[in-house]
Image (cartoon, rainbow, N blue to C red):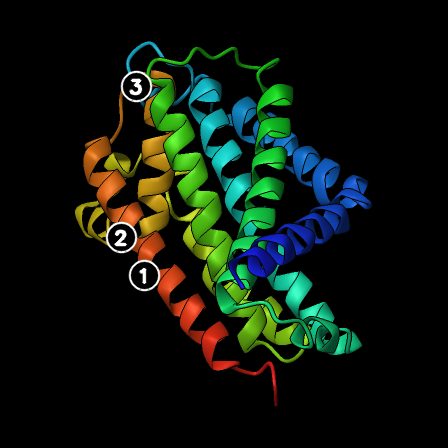
Amino acid sequence: MAAIDLAGAGTLFRKEVLRFWKVAFQTVAAPVLTAVLYLLIFGHVLEDHVEVFPGVRYTSFLVPGLVMMSVLQNAFANTSSSLIQSKITGNLVFLLLTPLSHWAWFVAYVAASAVRGLVVGLGVLLVTVWFAPLHLAEPWWVLVFAALGAGMLGALGLIAGLWAEKFDQLAAFQNFIVMPMTFLSGVFYSVKSLPGVWQAVSHLNPFFYMIDGFRRGFFGASDVSPWLSLAIVGTSFVVVSAIALRLLASGYKLRS
């Protein structure tokens, strides 16, 4: 049974990777272009007016935030869009006929979403670094938070895809939950520049810790301790993954 799960998870993973890679112009190139536009607009307007960390240009500060934002949004989009499309077109039944466990489903979908998120994030980094050269002060934090963030949003996309029954429900989940939490996580600013009450609200947002920890890897400076960020992001990943696994194991909105 373990061998079947392993082989099946590998096959499903390859199918999910090929699914987004065959339309890479839409799933990879378009998000990279969007991030570059954000960089050009915000960088041009605020470059000479904002300094978050001593000696760090605002454009340089902005790049890691845009990279991580792209990772999170695209990891979420991969699993959620795949599941809702399979539900609506009816081809989900072919997966239900397989002897794959809920663990195999989870690993395949989340791993594929992480690949998409990290590929887009790398693309954003390679393009934007031409505008604002960076150096890696503590590269291990970059790898840890990129992987955890992509995995968590992949699992969250799995939950959204299982819950949603039509595209407008999925759009609502993304527009009213994922998008605000991403944009209000310190991508474009340091939360230390906010009034006290909004600083407190920002610290309730797990996305803030992903981006702050990721940025720490580039500058060696952050708004909070990277170890605190790691604890919160790691706990959030475990909780979201546990919920996704429970829903998969129960067949939530899969067999109805």
Q: Nearer the viewer, residue 96 or 142?
A: 96
For the C terminus, the image quarter is bottom right
User: Which residue carries the number 3 mark?
Assistant: 53
Numbered-mark total: 3
Q: Locate residue 105, reporting x and y percent.
A: 56, 63
| Tag 3: amino acid | Phe
Helix, strand or loop status at disc 2: helix
How far is the residue under mark 1 from the one under mark 3? Answer: 33 Å
Helix, strand or loop status at disc 3: loop
Callouts 1 and 2 close, C-beta under 8 Å: yes
User: Which residue carries the number 2 mark?
Assistant: 235
How far is the residue under mark 1 from the one under mark 2? Answer: 6 Å
Helix, strand or loop status at disc 1: helix
Q: Residues within 10 Å of mark 2 (few under 14, many from 20)?
A: some
Image point 41% across, 21% down: which residue? 49
How far is the residue under mark 3 from the one under mark 2? Answer: 28 Å
Horizontal relation, residue 187 to residue 41: left or right: left
Comes first in the chain, label 1 or label 3: 3
Image point 50% across, 41% down: which residue? 69
Which label was assigned to residue 239?
1
